[in-house]
Image (cartoon, rainbow, N blue to C red):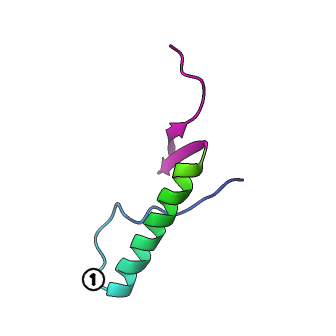
Amino acid sequence: IIFVSDELGMGIVPANAMSRVYRDLVGLANQYVAQRADEVYLSIAGITVEIKSRGVEPW
């Protein structure tokens, strides 16, 4: 399963209370999925960085 979501917590804090609640709920959902995922990637401006991998450690 591939889960794609927006990252809303890296910008300015919204002035609207409902927008802040939405931003917080999306952030909690992202954390929940990332904790259970085998791999997590962050992609910004076409550059993708591996955040989490459950591969075998090289040492």
Where 58 sits versus 4, above or below?
above
Q: Going 53% across and 52% down the picture, which residue do you hit? A: 34
Of 46 and 2, nearer the camera is 2
In this view, 17 is above or below 33: below
Where is residue 19, by image quadrant?
bottom left
Would you say residue 8 is visible in this rendering? yes
Q: Which residue is mark 1?
A: 15
Q: 36 above or below 30?
A: above
Picture residue at 59% right of the left edge, 48% below the top: 37
- Taking the image as shown, residue 43 lies to the left or right of residue 23, namely right
Horizontal placement of 38 versus 47: left or right? right
**Residue 54 coordinates in the image, percent (x, y):** 58, 34
Residue 46 visible to the viewer: no
Compare residues 34 and 14 and report the one nearer the observer: 34
Q: Are there few (<14), some (14-19), or many (20+) residues within 10 Å of tag 1?
A: few
Place residue 10 in its image quadrant.
bottom left
Residue 39 located within the stretch drawn in magenta: yes
Q: Residue at x 60, y 59 (%)?
A: 4
- Residue type at mark 1: give it: Ala
Secondary element type, mark 1: loop
List x then y, in percent, for residue 41: 53, 45
Q: Residue at x 56, y 57 (%)?
A: 33
Task: Give the magenta part as a residue range.
Answer: 38-59
Residue furthest out toward the right:
1
